[in-house]
């Protein structure tokens, strides 16, 4: 497992008209080993941008991001190695349509970790069983439902045996009836002690799985607390107003 430390991170974008958008402003979050931290907040608040800085998909302008003590913003840090240790699941599944479900899962372990196909397939089948899809191993992604495809995407990320997992609104592209099957897999990961940092609008999952909830608005972290604190007695008016609208 890994500890994630985000310290005073800021991320700006220059817009077409030359103005600067301050997407993330001086944000700090610590995710301890085995901890589940959920980032919530309105659309456009910088949640996904902040999450994507953790494996350098977005490059922060300032601050530091430490994975097990290694600062990914240090030019001497091997980002590829960090990405092997920190899995990520996106809103869209990004599965290769021409490959079978199993081949999607084993591709990275074989290419990056140099596993033999037999060993990779054994790991892949165990992971498919874990997400309840061992009967879909030979199917192409186009034959899967959205919920099934997202579960395959989770299995694919787990195939690299990461120390931590990032989830960027993993259920936002799914029909309502498919959301539970994905959240159930994530809940099992949380119970198994996986270090997790995720952005979600699923407040039921946040209540059930989170050790800590971070509320963001306008690029800033406004409030941090336990699920009980955040949902029953938020300290700030901005968090209270947001939660009143969605709960």
Image (cartoon, rainbow, N blue to C red):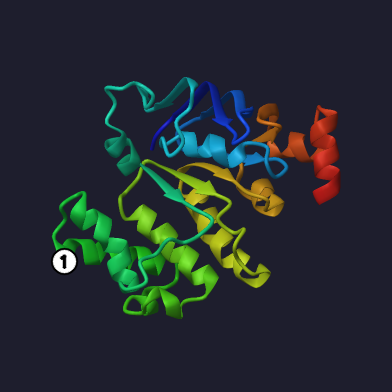
Give the quarter of the image for residue 28. top right
Q: Is residue 203 left or right of residue 118?
A: right
Where is residue 15 drawn, in percent x and y? 60, 34
**Residue 36 shows up from this direction:** no
In the picture shown, does residue 176 fall above or below 20?
Answer: below
**Residue 27 shows up from this direction:** yes
Q: Give whichever of 218, 21 is nearer the camera.
A: 21
> Residue at 45% across / 21% down in the picture?
64
Judged from the image, the secondary structure of the residue bearing numbered disc 1 is helix
In the picture shown, does residue 157 fall above or below 62?
Answer: below
> If the image is split into quadrants, where does the N terminus sit?
top left
> Residue at 21% across / 49% down in the picture?
112
Where is residue 10 drawn, in percent x and y? 55, 24
Q: Give whichever of 173, 84 is nearer the camera.
A: 173
> Residue at 81% across / 41% down in the picture?
242
> Residue at 38% across / 69% down in the picture?
129
Where is residue 85 drawn, in percent x and y? 33, 40
Label 1 Cα crowd, 10 Å radius (few <14 / some 14-19 / many 20+): few
Q: Give whichever of 97, 166 is nearer the camera.
A: 97
Which residue lies under the disc numbered 1? 118
Q: Give whichever of 31, 97 is nearer the camera.
A: 97
Q: Is residue 27 left or right of residue 164?
A: right
In the picture shown, does residue 235 fall above or below 37?
Answer: above
């Amino acid at each position: 497992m890994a500890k994630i430390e985000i310290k005073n991170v800021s991320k700006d974008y220059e817009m077409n008209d030359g103005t600067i958008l301050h997407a993330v402003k001086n944000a700090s979050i610590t995710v301890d080993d085995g901890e589940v931290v959920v980032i919530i907040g309105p659309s456009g608040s910088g949640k996904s941008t902040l999450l994507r800085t953790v494996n350098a998909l977005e490059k922060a302008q300032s601050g530091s991001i430490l994975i097990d003590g290694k600062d990914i913003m240090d030019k001497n840090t091997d980002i590829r190695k960090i990405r092997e240790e920190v899995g990520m699941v996106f809103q869209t599944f990004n599965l290769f349509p021409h490959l079978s479900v199993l081949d999607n899962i084993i591709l990275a372990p074989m290419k990056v970790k140099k596993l033999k196909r037999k060993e990779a397939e054994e790991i892949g089948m165990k992971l498919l069983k874990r997400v309840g899809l061992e009967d879909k191993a030979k199917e192409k992604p186009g034959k899967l439902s959205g919920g099934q495809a997202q579960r395959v995407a989770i299995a694919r990320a787990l195939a690299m045996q990461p120390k931590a997992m990032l989830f960027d609104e993993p259920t936002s592209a799914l029909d309502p009836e498919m959301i539970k099957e994905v959240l159930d897999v994530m809940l099992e990961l949380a119970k198994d002690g996986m270090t997790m940092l995720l952005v979600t609008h699923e407040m039921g999952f946040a209540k059930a799985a989170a050790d800590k909830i971070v509320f963001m608005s306008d690029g800033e972290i406004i409030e941090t607390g336990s699920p009980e604190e955040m949902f029953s007695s938020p300290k700030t008016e901005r968090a209270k107003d947001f939660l009143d609208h969605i709960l």
